[in-house]
Image (tube, rainbow, N blue to C red):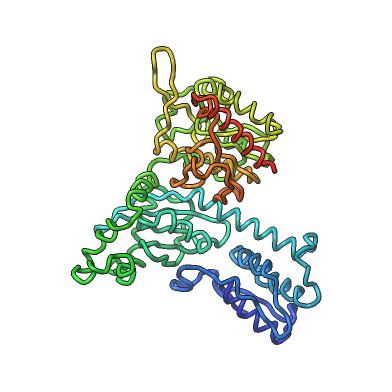
Amino acid sequence: MNVETFEEWRNEARRLLARNVAPDAVSFGSVSEQPLLDMLAGGEHDTDAPIETASHSVPKEFLQLAETVAYHRDPQRWNLMYRTLWRLTHGERHLLNITTDDDVYQLYRMQKSVSRDVHKMKAFVRFRKVASEDDVERFVAWHRSDHRILRLAAPFFSRRFKAMHWTILTPNESVTWDHSELTYGPGVPANDAPDGDALEELWKTYYASIFNPARIKVETMRREMPTRYWPTMPETKLIPELLAAAPQRVEEMIERHEGFAETAVKYIPSEFNLASLRVAAAGCRACDLCERATQTVFGIGPADAKVVIVGEQPGDEEDLAGQPFVGPAGRLLGQAFVEAGMDRSSVYVTNAVKHFSFVDRGKRRLHKKPSAKEIFACRPWLEAELLALRPEVVVCLGATAAQVLLGRDFRLTDQRGREHVSDWCPRTIATWHPAAILRTVDPARKQEMFTQLVGDLQQSIA
Ligand code: URA
């Protein structure tokens, strides 16, 4: 029985269950693991619809699990999913609670592997501007994932780089975003990750075979343009107008500038753990800060830390010692850990930027806030650390760290102490940076901020 997507499997499974076909009487497979060009453009699925059979309904938890597992590369996944569905609807309704069961164990293992692969893709896809024959700026990235996750991850990129024209090429499948719609195309096989000119060549071949630049999204324009402008303008003129009218224009310009600047991603080993990341980060030259700083100050703490603390960047003392938070701000943080009842040695402490940024004042080196470009260049190190650590909670100290993980709109004064889901951790909290507390002159306010820092740290371990 041929199925290519979760929806197709779900429909077949529903039909088979209704006919009472046992798992050993059926075998699922994919004729081709190469989905067709226009199949399922957009990739949104309705997992809320329960599979109903004559006499059973299926737990929602199973549907969510199966939907993720459907992206796993193992050809046996469809059979495993059907066998589990059968068991759930034939007397083992609570099967998913038995995590030692072989089938359940396999499903959760596969779900974890797919989720990890999606995180990796979100962290490591970097776009490069390519020459194009029309007036539109186009960007392309290459990525090799372990599983067939492009459709799962693509909506994230369309949100993050929504003002761009971009294509992500992978060996199995490709996707193009044109401001309004995701369009999937065939994969582009390559032996090694193509860089520079090789990527450009690959893109040209792909573009020539797939993309139709004359296609203009009239409906999207109608939706987004004030209608009073609409009737008088030729479609082609509307494209720049549409961009100019977008409410987040300025945001996107910044994102666009940063999104394609030099980053540390090329210094990150393809397989890594905290130890190999630390070694690789010591040689990072992704931005100019490395020229004047003494050394890279990488994160420190146990690899199984449940709590990760993210600061802004090392200061003077950290730069010399090669360890985060050992100077005045670090001492105040230590005091806050004690008051919050936290064991500092169980926490992983790091920074959004790994080199000291400073201006000279006579013999002193004064902290200088890192630029957006430097923060962006360094971001892959933090993302890789979080990928390796998979913490339960991340506490961002100050707005810089918070904006890296929670988005540029994050405002510490409004949102301090609240829990957010970030791409890196289900519980992400932002609180005062200890240096901001040290700088506060008014004693009452200073005390209040310190109490809030302690409270937020307590919340992180609650
Ligand atoms: N401030 C930070 O944000 N990080 C450090 O490591 C030290 C001071």
Quadrant for residue 77, please give it: bottom right
In the image, what residue occupies the spot 44% across and 33% down? 285
Residue 360 sits above or below residue 52 on the image: above
Quadrant for residue 87, please give it: bottom right
In the image, what residue occupies the spot 58% across and 42% down? 417
Q: Residue furthest front?
A: 444
Q: Position of residue 111 (x, y in %)?
A: 65, 60
- Can see residue 157? yes
- Can see residue 76? no
In front of the other: 151 or 235: 235
Residue 75 sits above or below residue 253 on the image: below
Quadrant for residue 222, please give it: bottom left
User: In which quadrant is the N terminus drawn?
Assistant: bottom right
Total numbered labels: 0
In the image, what residue occupies the spot 48% across and 64% down? 173
Residue 3 sits above or below residue 311 on the image: below
Q: Position of residue 406 (x, y in %)?
A: 50, 47
Q: Position of residue 186 (x, y in %)?
A: 45, 67
In the image, what residue occupies the spot 67% across and 38% down? 458
Residue 173 sits above or below residue 415 on the image: below
In front of the other: 37 or 12: 12
Q: Position of residue 462 (x, y in %)?
A: 70, 43
